[in-house]
Amino acid sequence: MVQSPPAYRIEATDRPDPSIRDVLADALLAYNETWLGPSASRPLALLIRSQDGAQVVGGLWGRTSFRWLYVELLFLPEALRGRHIGKELLTLAETEARKRGCLGSWLDTFSSKAHGFYEAHGYRLFGGIADYPPGHSRRSLMKRFEDQG
């Protein structure tokens, strides 16, 4: 007996339930692990809290997976910039990534100022998209830890 494929419908939305992203990400990761091997995927967050600890005002959000650190978000409010806190966040994240057996780190940025910051900390451009957004560019940078001595 020939089985017919399951029925489906495609739905477009600009307000998806955030938990749906996890469903898709978990399914894709499970699929990828069948041919790439275990990802050892783990989140990594370094949070900067207000003085009273009640609110997150900045920090780094990323993940280690397949022996690489991906820095998804790194944000500092203006009042904390220029005090080497960004360097501290990046260093702490890289140190933890090394402990997790990572080979390097990668990230994307829109900002030419941020691009310079990352290059000063050993990151090198490996790709990008011109005019994203129009008049600007998105830049992808990476750093192999072994290159850092």
Image (spheres, rainbow, N blue to C red):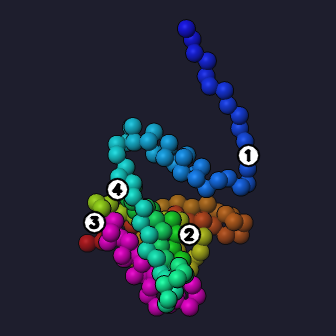
Disc number at residue 12?
1
Label 2 element class: strand
The Cα–Cα distance between marks 4 and 2, rounded to whole angstroms, is 21 Å
Q: Choose the circle earlier in sequence order: 2 or 1.
A: 1
Q: What's the residue type where badge 1 is placed?
A: Ala
Where residue 24 sits in the image (x, y, percent)? 55, 46
Residue 128 magenta-drawn? no
Q: Residue furthest left?
A: 149
Disc number at residue 99?
3
Where residue 51 sits in the image (x, y, percent)? 49, 90
The Cα–Cα distance between marks 2 and 1, rounded to whole angstroms, is 28 Å
Query: Does the image show residue 76?
Result: no
Q: What's the residue type where badge 3 is placed?
A: Lys
Disc number at residue 109?
2
Residues rendered magenta in the picture: 77-98
Q: Choose the circle earlier in sequence order: 3 or 4.
A: 4
- The nearer-to-camera label among 4 and 2 is 4
- The nearer-to-camera label among 3 and 4 is 3
Where residue 55 sits in the image (x, y, percent)? 54, 81
Label 4 element class: loop
Q: Name the residue under label 4.
A: 67
